Amino acid sequence: MTSVSSSQLTLNFDPALPERFPTLREYIAFRSSANQKPAKSIAMDMDLSPSMLSRKLNPKEDDTQRFNVDDLENWIRASGDAAAVVEYLSAKYLETDITRHARAIHQTEQLLAQLSALLPTLKGSV
């Protein structure tokens, strides 16, 4: 069995992620509510009130409060959810048409291998 370093990160390009959340800020707002740690605790660890964090993550059109890069670093530290941020940015900016195509080919090859292995069993059971 191979051991994996605890600092190793495996990226899963989920193409639906950027489609569901057009901005990183919107994704962080979602992750804040889905995090194991309550949003209230995340806000307090960021030295923000829960309402201020919510305001920054869900700004109104004329609101001057914005979620900035310093807030992002504080949110990552407070939430412990750095991997989610990296996965979102990777899915949005690193996957190209070429890598999507290569991934589709790889998945198809895996499925074909599985089907080829099952076919003799299916033919023999008739």
Image: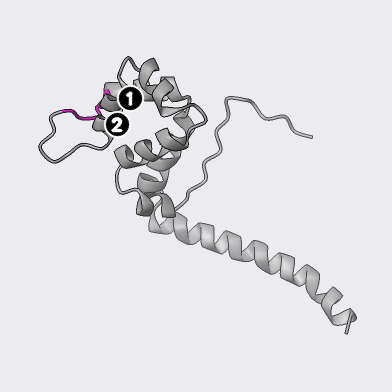
In the rendered structure, which amino acid carries the disc numbered 1?
A: Pro
Q: Secondary structure at mark 1?
A: helix
**According to the image, label 2 marks what residue?**
54
On residue 92, the disc is: none
In the rendered structure, which amino acid carries the disc numbered 2?
A: Ser
**Residue drawn at x 57%, y 25% as measured from the top left:** 7
Locate the N terminus and report the quarter of the image it occupies.
Answer: top right
Q: Position of residue 88 (x, y in %)?
A: 41, 42
Q: Looking at the image, which is closer to me, 30 or 112?
A: 30
Is 66 in the magenta? Answer: yes
Q: Determine whether, in the image, residue 121 is placed left or right of residue 59.
A: right
Q: Position of residue 58 (x, y in %)?
A: 26, 37
On residue 50, the disc is: 1
Q: Secondary structure at mark 2?
A: helix
Do the numbered discs 1 and 2 sit on residues whose CB atoms are within 8 Å? yes
Specify few, some or many for label 1: CA neighbours under 10 Å numbering under 14, 14-19, or 20 or more. Answer: some
* Stretch in magenta: 65-69
